[in-house]
Image (cartoon, rainbow, N blue to C red):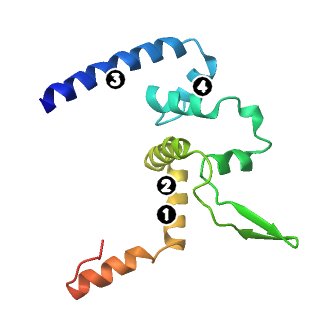
């Protein structure tokens, strides 16, 4: 019974994907999105439909914040602080950009070096906790 349902859902999803792909084929912006490394049909459609008109964003900072790629900032007395509420924005846009960044890190030396620098700077945290627990012979609580 469950395999029949899974097969039915798979067929329905495939049919929907075909119809959506046909409706978006003639969009030049979609072709431009697909030219980015790591973005194919599904990720391209996700970005295309979730962003909408890019002109609605005042700056690249506003766009990256909307995509959950930059932490929110609070300003008080002329000073900038990292604000709470990091879950603001569109959760469906963070995923394609993270996938694209991962692909770029694998394909381009410059991106790979940036990732290595960033990892060294942020080394520690949960990685040290895991290593310490492993050395002690214990397991993590999660």
Q: Which mark is residue 32?
A: 4
Q: Nearer the viewer, mark 3 or mark 1?
A: 3
Residue at which label 1 appears: 116
Point 60% across, 52% down: residue: 69
Task: Please say if the residues under marks 3 and 1 sit with CB atoms less than 8 Å apart.
Answer: no
Query: Looking at the picture, does residue 33 appear above or below residue 22?
Result: below
| Quarter assignment of residue 60 | top right
Point 62% across, 18% down: residue: 28
**First-in-chain label (3 vs 1):** 3
Q: For mark 3, does the 10 Å Cα neighbourhood hold few (<14), some (14 to 19), or many (20 or more) residues?
A: few
**First-in-chain label (4 vs 2):** 4
| Quarter assignment of residue 130 | bottom left
The answer for how far apart the CA atoms under marks 4 and 2 are is 24 Å
Q: Which mark is residue 112?
A: 2
Residue at which label 3 appears: 13
Task: Please say if the residues under marks 3 and 2 sit with CB atoms less than 8 Å apart.
Answer: no
Q: Dividing the image into 4 quarters, which one contains the C terminus?
A: bottom left
Q: Is residue 135 left or right of residue 118?
A: left
Q: Is residue 19 left or right of residue 66?
A: left
The answer for how far apart the CA atoms under marks 3 and 1 are is 38 Å
* Image spot of residue 61 (x, y percent): 73, 50
């Amino acid at each position: 019974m469950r395999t029949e349902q899974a097969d039915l859902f798979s067929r329905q999803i495939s049919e929907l994907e075909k119809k959506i792909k046909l409706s978006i084929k003639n969009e030049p912006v979609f072709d431009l999105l697909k030219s980015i490394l790591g973005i194919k049909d599904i990720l391209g459609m996700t970005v295309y439909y979730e962003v909408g008109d890019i002109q609605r964003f005042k700056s690249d900072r506003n766009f990256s914040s909307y995509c959950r790629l930059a932490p929110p900032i609070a300003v008080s007395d002329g000073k900038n602080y990292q604000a709470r509420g990091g879950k603001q924005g569109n959760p469906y846009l963070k995923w394609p950009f993270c996938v694209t960044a991962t692909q770029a890190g694998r394909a381009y030396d410059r991106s790979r070096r940036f990732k290595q620098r960033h990892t060294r700077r942020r080394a520690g945290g949960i990685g040290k906790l895991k290593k310490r627990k492993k050395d002690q012979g214990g397991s993590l609580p999660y």
